[in-house]
Amino acid sequence: MRRPVYLLVASAFASTCALLGSPPAWATASSAGPGVTALKQSALRYARVTLSGGFTELEATLSHECHSTDHVTPQNLPLARALWERQIGVSFAMIRITGVGVRDVTKRSAQAEVHYNTPKAGNDNWVTFVVNSGHWKVGGQCATPIGNSEHSGP
């Protein structure tokens, strides 16, 4: 009895992955959209630019829907950072990123939480990400990636 071609291909793919140690990037992000690694990178980038990046960098991390609810402008970004620092009680210059977690990952959306070196900085702040033009971007209400549940938005 002949095995269907797709089973042969799947078997060959599994054997190749076993030899290489992991599937190639094109296999993990194909029809499922961007993968978890890309989501984590996007969450880390959003956290870094929120802490110390420029306005253009910050805007590049936001989805189309987030742009309509975001109230940060090039003129008020320094003031917004000062407000966020006051809310969390820690200078952004003192904060170090220590990791990132993800949950509820689907083909089109997910949540990510960046972890910091201080509990007061809010290691309980999940941010919604959506796939925009093939990339993970901050979606929904544009929650800041740092703070706590009480101070999650700008």
Image (tube, rainbow, N blue to C red):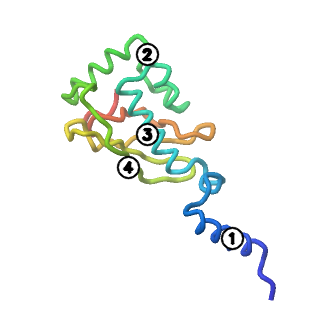
Provide the residue designation for mark 1: 10
**Residue at (81% x, 84% y) in the render:** 2
Q: Element at badge 4? A: strand
Question: What is the crowding at mark 4: few (fewer than 14 residues within 10 Å), some, or many (at least 20)?
Answer: some
Provide the residue designation for mark 3: 43
Amino acid marked by disc 3: Ala
Q: Element at badge 1? A: helix
Q: Residue 73 carries which label?
A: 2
Provide the residue designation for mark 4: 101
Q: Of circles 3 and 1, which is in front? A: 1
**Which residue, as the protein is rendered here, is positioned at the far top?**
75
Among numbered discs 4 and 3, the one appearing first in the sequence: 3
Amino acid marked by disc 1: Ala
Q: Quadrant of residue 87?
A: top left
For the residue pair 2 and 147, the one nearer the viewer reads as: 2
**Residue at (53% x, 40% y) in the render:** 136
Question: What is the crowding at mark 3: few (fewer than 14 residues within 10 Å), some, or many (at least 20)?
Answer: many
